[in-house]
């Protein structure tokens, strides 16, 4: 048998190596055709699912808006329990059910806000927090209002840390002359309940400096003086 030398070995291996590395375009397509097709099918399925989701959400939003009409009417008439629970015997849905069933829609989002407000009015503070916490909006007035109401609920539960957190969020979100000073007043009072006189004074001072035309300025000056005096005593 002929001895295989270091020079002869590579020459015999070369054709096989060339076959592996110099594949034709047809061979490459054949080799990777299945994985590529799987990827394309998966992408088409994903796009289709997203399109269906958006269409379905749009349809659900329209249905939710229609179903909310009667519940909002009850809310405006201060018939809070009917607004919240609806009238099952007449197949009239309440705001809580709409908020739960259509949570991914704009109408369901608004229903969560209404539901939180009702629970707050009914002194069910944790339930109010749960539903107001689900509300999410780019509309400055309502979003800030939701956070302020959450602060109110936490305050009722004597959780002054969270109350201050949400009053602060409300006061910092798209501030304006009409409502921000009221949120800052609540923030200052929450800090007072925590005996954080420095933070309380800063909240009142922000009203005085940033919103000098506000109707809350007079109270802000009075409460700032109180907080400053308390801070001096505590130091």
Image (tube, rainbow, N blue to C red):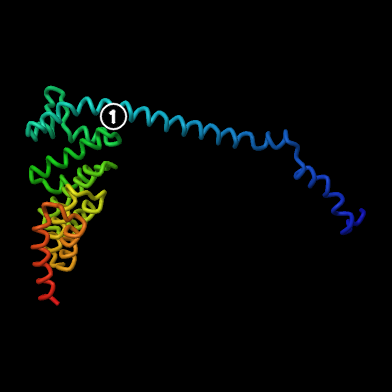
Point out residue 140 in the picture as x, y percentages from the top left corner. 25, 44
Q: In the picture, which quadrant includes the C terminus?
A: bottom left
Point out residue 193 in the picture as x, y percentages from the top left corner. 11, 63
Note whether 14 is above or below 219 in the view shown. above
Note whether 175 is above or below 44 in the view shown. below
Q: Going by the picture, which residue comes out furthest to the bottom?
A: 235
Using the rendered view, name the quadrant where residue 52 is placed. top left
Point out residue 163 in the picture as x, y percentages from the top left corner. 17, 56
Point out residue 98 in the picture as x, y percentages from the top left corner. 21, 32
Is 25 left, or right, of 43 in this rendering? right
Residue at figure coordinates x 72%, y 33% from the top left: 26
Of helix, strand and loop, which one carries label 1?
helix
Number of residues whose C-alpha sits closer than 10 Å to that of mark 1, classed few (under 14), some (14–19) or many (20 or more): many
Q: What residue is disc 1 on?
A: 61
Residue at figure coordinates x 21%, y 39% from the top left: 112
Q: Nearer the viewer, residue 48 or 219?
A: 219
Using the rendered view, name the quadrant where residue 53 is placed. top left
């Amino acid at each position: 048998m002929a001895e295989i030398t270091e020079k002869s070995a590579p020459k015999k291996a070369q054709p096989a190596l060339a076959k592996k590395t110099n594949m034709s375009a047809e061979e490459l397509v054949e080799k990777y055709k299945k994985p590529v097709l799987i990827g394309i099918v998966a992408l088409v399925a994903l796009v289709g699912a997203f399109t269906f989701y958006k269409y379905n959400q749009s349809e659900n939003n329209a249905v939710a808006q229609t179903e909310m009409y009667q519940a909002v009417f009850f809310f405006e008439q201060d018939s809070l329990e009917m607004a919240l629970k609806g009238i099952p015997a007449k197949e009239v849905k309440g705001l809580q059910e709409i908020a739960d069933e259509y949570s991914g829609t704009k109408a369901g989002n608004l229903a969560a806000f209404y539901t939180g407000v009702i629970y707050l009015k009914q002194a069910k503070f944790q339930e109010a927090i749960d539903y107001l916490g689900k509300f999410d909006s780019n509309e400055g007035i309502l979003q800030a209002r939701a956070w302020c109401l959450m602060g109110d609920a936490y305050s009722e539960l004597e959780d002054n840390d969270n109350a201050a957190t949400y009053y602060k969020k409300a006061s910092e979100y798209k501030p304006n002359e009409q409502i921000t000073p009221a949120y800052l007043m609540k923030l200052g009072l929450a800090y007072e309940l925590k005996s954080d006189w420095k933070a309380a004074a800063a909240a009142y001072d922000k009203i005085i400096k940033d919103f000098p035309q506000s109707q809350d300025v007079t109270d802000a000056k009075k409460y700032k003086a109180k907080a400053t005096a308390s801070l001096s005593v505590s130091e």
